[in-house]
Amino acid sequence: MKVFTRLFRYYLYLVGLLFVGRAALFAFYFDRFSDDDVPYMLSFIYGLRMDTIAVSYLLIIPTILLAFSPKIFAQVLDKVLRFYFLVIILLLVYMENATFPFFAEYDVRPNYKFVEYLEYPKEVFAMIFAEYKLAMLLSGIMMFLVGRFYMKHSKGDFADVLQETYWKRILVFIPIAVLLFIGIRSSFGHRAANNSDAMYSTNRVINEITKNTVYSVAYSIYANKKFSSKVLKQYGKMPINEALRRVRARLDINSTDEKSIFSRLEKSHFKRNKPKNLVIFLQESVGAQFAGSVGGEEGIMPHFDALSKEGIIFTDLYSNGTRSIRGIAGVVSGNFAVPGKGILKRPKSQSDWFTIARLFKPLGYETSFIYGGESHFDNMRGWFLGNGFDKVIDQPDMKDPEFVGTWGICDAEVVGYADKEFSRLYALNKPFMSVVFSTSNHTPFDFPDRKIELIEGIAKKSVKNAIKYADFAIGKMIEKAKKGGYYKDTVFLIVSDHNVRVYGQDSVPVNMFHIPGLILGGGIKAGSYTKIASHPDIIATALDLVGADFKYPILGHSIFSDKKQELSLMQFNNNYALMIKDKIAVLRPGKAANTYLYNRDKNLKITDKHLLPQEHDSELEKDVLAFVLVMNYLYDKSLYR
């Protein structure tokens, strides 16, 4: 029985480490759920279930080795298993420590983001060393102390187990294997338990605390790398014909194109003999709470707020998701977020995928993507060049910059390089379409000195000051365009890719998807669009103002079209929210959909608006499932061209 007792002891060790991590996270974020009417102490019961799943996986190798290794390998096996558990213990200590800064940044436990960015070590490690020095130091000290304690007190832990007879160890292996199988499956139902079983509460924060970080990361790698119909089925089942019918009805889009099933001809409401240029200034991580012109705080984006009086301001605009690649896909392709990995990084969308560049090519436009960082990040270079853009201008092409931060050349300088490119093309009478992507408003918030008046009372390297600098660059871009003469012949779209930090206790914090958006340029009549709009809607509107008829599959409509719907689809991690006016259906993997009302009380700050539970709206809940299935179907069958 020594095999069982020794493995059980290590089960308790590992579960104990995970319990301490959960208890610390619970205490740290207690104010985020203590006032809600939720049974938050159950987090430790459900959490034990999640920890048991993870630890049961980790005990498989020791179980096999202890049961089947001959006695003569007792000393060798003791060293091997001590080293194995040392690595596991250090990994758990590290992951539990890493959970805190990750939670502070993304408001969730570590998931696929935690490993995805390791593809870009230069940017990622520069950010980590700049922003998380103290966290790394504390984690290192803790790992050293725990590791040293373990090695000092674990000598001979496994050698004596092999002194038991071979047959006794083999016999006890069977019940232990059964227990591990039960622990891993953690369910006697038709499906094994997974991350969705940690979501027992209506408060999203306590659900995240209930999860297990190691399992959460491992499961997210599986879900993203091995995305399959099995993973998709966790959202629910529906015949694809019904799903398509529902999505078409909600979007009011009819198409007879079999190769691009949402493609249709959209005639401009501003038809011109010479269509205008189009410049999209995509802002990194700017939420509506920072722009006074859309209901946010005054004084942080003075240039944007002033320019809002010169163009069409979107006061109720919502982003696709919480990542730049979701925002890029929404604005440049006009589609919603696909389940799993983003479109920019998927193999089937590296060519023959619709982007707005394909619309301008037949009209003789020169198209470009301009970015102050290195465009290999998130596969932006490959995706843009593979889908119709003539060229990518990024950091290596921008010679002799005055200021380079962690993520690249600062926004105001990028605007200068863009202006030179636009002025050159304008002088040649060459029409152009360009996407300019901001970098400055990104942790650790690097931007040059003496460019803005810092906001009083907060550190220079902070969200608000970084956004104020990004806003300074917005003002510079329009100022240069007016001086260069091409402003009058260009439509400018200024829009955020996503909010700076999407957080909140709601299963999908819709208020944190609220972003600023503005369209302006020569001859564009100033006004305010106060109804719900999405990334696909705002790009459809900009194309309408260009003044040409376009055939495209964009999943939205110009605000000047009578087909424009008050609709937005938002993705938060693996959760989806479909908002139709003030009503919202939220769908989570492995869980039934729920219906909410979005609290739009004008007396509340944007950050204080939340979802209010409502009676189930079965049709709306079916529609959110339909959108998820259709977005996957469009990608899987290459039907978004």
Image (spheres, grey):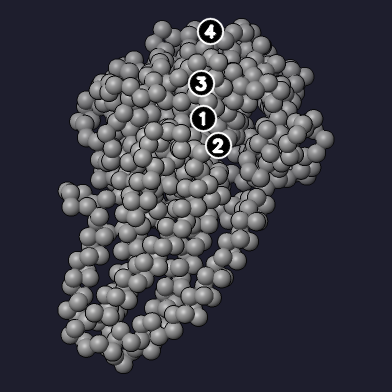
Q: CA distance from mark 3 to mark 4?
A: 23 Å
**Sequence-first tag of 4 and 1:** 4
Q: Residue visible at 63% across and 26% down?
A: 290
Q: CA distance from mark 2 to mark 3?
A: 17 Å
Residue 555, position in %: x, y? 40, 23
- Residue 544 appearing in the image: no
Mark 4 element type: loop
Confirm or deny contact between disc 2 and disc 4 (CB under 8 A): no
Mark 1 element type: helix
**Sequence-first tag of 2 and 3:** 3
Give the residue type that dot 3 points to.
Leu
Callout 2 crowding tier (Cα within 10 Å): few <14, some 14–19, many ≥20: some
Judge by depth and name the residue closer to the eye, 508 or 558. Answer: 508
Give the residue type that dot 2 points to.
Arg
Mark 3 element type: strand
Residue named by callout 4: 270
What is the quadrant of the N terminus in the image? bottom left
Callout 4 crowding tier (Cα within 10 Å): few <14, some 14–19, many ≥20: some
Residue named by callout 1: 512
Closer to the observer: label 4 or label 1? Answer: 1
In the image, residue 615 above or below residue 186? above
**Sequence-first tag of 3 and 4:** 4
Q: CA distance from mark 1 to mark 3?
A: 11 Å
Confirm or deny contact between disc 1 and disc 2 (CB under 8 A): yes
Label annotation for residue 529: none
Q: Residue visible at 21% across and 87% down?
A: 166
In the image, residue 563 above or below residue 417? above
Q: Residue visible at 68% across and 21% down?
A: 298
Residue 47, position in %: x, y? 36, 52
